Image (cartoon, helix red, strand yellow):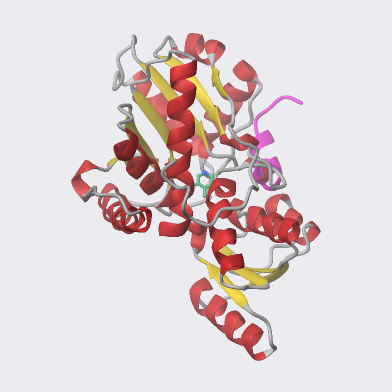
């Protein structure tokens, strides 16, 4: 495997299932839809960060760390999975979350507390500045902190998605399945960079097509290419990566990050009711809404096959309960 020479610890339940979505396919009138169930990776509720953390936490342990520090939004799936990984490895964990403490601690924030993480709110300062201060304080107190960036999106974490492409490539061969597109939610560039590098390295032909969650197409292209280049270097591969080959749709940003609108609500409800699968309000709901819109606009041929890469996040649903139930008959 491409990643065998790098430090890695087993944290995720792998391989995740690759399943057909016959009732959603029918509801949308084609193309043929499959789903890659990275919502089932484990670490206290699943999600794509488990794959990255196998490498990020191994690197922290390799450097002798006793404390993980990471950062994210209030409903960060990444922070929750990092807290779970820290607990599994006997490490301390501090998560720095954007803004001020909400009135109630629900969803991922509740889980951060249950998993034993110390939660720090950044208030009016940037999360990065606060995380840096926290690391300094920890060092001064005699601990050995290791800071994992937002979304574990650097060349260390992205390697998890290079390995994920090898995993899916094997599954496609086993299932004798030809896929034309892989569609997923892209935000902090690491997942997409890993998928793109992995695809190039193994000759994986499906088009890696991101739905942007909170950045423009140009921002995604630049950010993904940068992490891809660093990931290629870390893996010792002889490849290159350029912004223009990064595929991203940025027409679904809605009212901003973590603000759920009607398209996300419709996508969450449709997938729940046709397939019994839970999406999330921030990432996969938006990515699915984007994919549904692209299907309705004829962006994909009806005889093509698409894999929707489910990146997790359903723990956040509970923090959006009131909005999700608005207009529903109970
Ligand atoms: C973090 C996250 C993503 C985006 O992954 P990036 O590597 O930041 O692009 C997508 N879906 C869910 C549920 C996430 O938590």
For the N terminus, which image quadrant? top left
Q: Main secondary structure of the magenta part?
A: helix
Give how far across and how far down residue 320 sits, in percent.
Answer: 66, 44
Camera-side residue: 283 or 44? 44
Q: Is residue 265 left or right of residue 162?
A: right
User: The C terminus lies in which quarter of the figure?
Assistant: top right
Q: Residue furthest bottom?
A: 140
Q: Is residue 171 magenta?
A: no
Find residue 258 and report its horizontal and vertical position in percent. 53, 50
Q: Is residue 317 magenta?
A: yes
Quadrant of res 199: top left
| 40 lies left or right of 252 | right
Residue 188 visible in the shown view: yes
Near-viewer residue (297 or 71): 71
Q: Is residue 261 above or below residue 108?
A: above
Q: Which stretch appears magenta?
A: 316-330
Name the residue at 63% across, 73% down.
Answer: 65
What residue sits 43% from the left and 9% below the top? 29
Q: Is residue 51 above or below residue 175?
A: below
Q: Is residue 24 left or right of residue 11?
A: left
């Amino acid at each position: 495997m491409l990643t065998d020479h790098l430090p890695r610890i087993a944290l995720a339940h792998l391989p995740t299932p690759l399943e057909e979505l016959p009732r959603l396919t029918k509801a949308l009138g084609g193309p043929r839809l499959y789903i890659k169930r990275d919502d089932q990776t484990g670490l206290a509720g699943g999600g794509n960060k488990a794959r990255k953390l196998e490498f990020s936490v191994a690197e922290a342990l390799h450097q002798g760390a006793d404390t993980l520090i990471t950062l994210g939004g209030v409903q960060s799936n990444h922070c929750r999975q990092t807290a779970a990984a820290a607990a599994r490895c006997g490490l301390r964990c501090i998560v720095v979350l954007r803004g001020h403490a909400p009135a109630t601690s629900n969803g991922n924030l509740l889980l951060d507390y249950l998993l034993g993480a110390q939660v720090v709110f950044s208030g009016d300062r940037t999360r990065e500045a606060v995380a840096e201060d926290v690391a300094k304080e920890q060092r001064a107190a005699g601990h050995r902190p290791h800071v994992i960036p937002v979304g574990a999106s650097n060349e260390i974490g992205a390697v998890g998605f290079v390995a994920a492409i090898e995993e899916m490539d094997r599954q496609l061969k086993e299932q004798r399945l030809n896929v034309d597109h892989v569609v997923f939610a892209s935000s902090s560039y690491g997942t997409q960079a890993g998928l793109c590098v992995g695809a190039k390295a193994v000759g994986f032909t499906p088009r890696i097509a991101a739905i942007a969650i909170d950045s423009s197409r140009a921002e995604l292209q630049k950010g993904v290419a940068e992490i891809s280049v660093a990931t290629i270097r870390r893996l010792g591969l002889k490849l290159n990566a350029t912004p223009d080959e990064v595929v991203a749709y940025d027409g679904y940003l809605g009212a901003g990050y973590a603000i759920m609108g009607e398209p996300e609500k419709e996508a969450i409800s449709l997938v729940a009711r046709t397939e019994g699968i839970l999406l999330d309000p921030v990432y996969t709901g938006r990515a699915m809404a984007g994919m549904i819109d692209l299907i309705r606009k004829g962006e994909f041929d009806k005889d093509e096959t698409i894999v929707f890469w489910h990146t997790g996040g359903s723990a956040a649903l509970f923090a959006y309960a009131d909005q999700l139930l608005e207009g529903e008959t109970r």
